[in-house]
Image: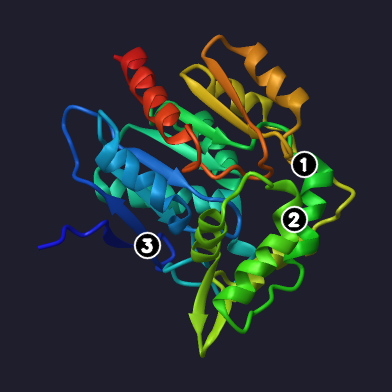
Amino acid sequence: MIEAEFQDFFYTSADNLRLHARIYGEARADVLPIICLAGLTRNARDFHRLALFLSRDAANHRQVIAFDYRGRGESEYDTNWQNYTIGTELADTLAGLDQLGIRRGLFIGTSRGGLITQVLAKIKPGLIVGAVLNDIGPVVEPQGLNIIRRYLDTPEAAPSITDAVEHQKKVHGRAFPALSDDDWTAMFDAVFREENGLAVADFDADLVKTLTSADPDQPLPQLWAEFDALAKRPVLAIRGANSMLLSAETLAEMAARSKLVETITVPGQGHAPFLETGELPERIASFMDRAEKYAA
């Protein structure tokens, strides 16, 4: 019998939406689990290859839980798009962790997931033992946010998988010269689903309204207080060398604010680096071990 790569976990939000997460590996009493939170339009599949490594191949393998926010992946869509907020998604994540009985863990937050992680550290300081922030920090650069607004303005269906992959290369290729064909295919697998023979973006189209309805001239509030709360425990901050969302200056300031902050700049990648590429899986696994040991 071939062992399943992951288990599906469905749970109910406070407002009765059916939400989903993937669970990789078995719970262990001797090591903490890893909780993965994806970017704005991404889902649990974004972490698939990394989660397999961390739950199976890493020296100190751990259970990994990767969440689909409402309106993404296999989670139910919200009829009110104004509920697609960091606060609601944070509450949904806490509900899932509570139903799984998880009281402490190690976090990986990509982009929006990293914003949620920083806020979570402020309101639930005992929950996070260590965190990886993937191409996100307390300051979101307006230029990068506007780029995201433009390419999400009209989510497109593609007539085939090949066309969808080529579209991703066209949109993101300049920022990601380091990616292989397998990496681009992995991006397709995380972003699209097949529907009526077409490759369709796997998120609620109304999610885009959360960006297009906002004033593009108003930057997001800075989260230095939230980051400082997070940086009381080990943090690994990862930046794509070509990122337009997390600046090199912000990354340097993050490291300067706490001796517990480590940084990595990934060459040939933009927003956000693929965490399963190069040496990143091994470096993330090693960081998780150090973070848990620091908390012991």
Q: Position of residue 95 (x, y in %)?
A: 37, 51
- The image quarter containing residue 169 is bottom right
- The residue located at (60%, 40%) in the rendering is 115
Reading the image, the residue beneath label 2 is 148
Name the image quarter holding the N terminus. Answer: bottom left
Reading the image, the residue beneath label 3 is 20
Q: CA distance from mark 1 to mark 3?
A: 30 Å
| Amino acid carrying mark 3 in the image | His
Task: Please say if the residues under marks 1 and 3 sit with CB atoms less than 8 Å apart.
Answer: no
Q: Is residue 256 left or right of residue 10?
A: right
Q: Is residue 264 left or right of residue 49?
A: right
Which is nearer the eye, 285 or 183? 183
| Amino acid carrying mark 1 in the image | Met
- Per the image, label 2 sits on a secondary structure element best described as helix
Which disc number belongs to residue 244? 1
Q: Earlier in the sequence, mark 1 or mark 3?
A: 3
Q: Position of residue 94 (x, y in %)?
A: 40, 46
Q: Earlier in the sequence, mark 2 or mark 1?
A: 2
- Per the image, label 3 sits on a secondary structure element best described as strand
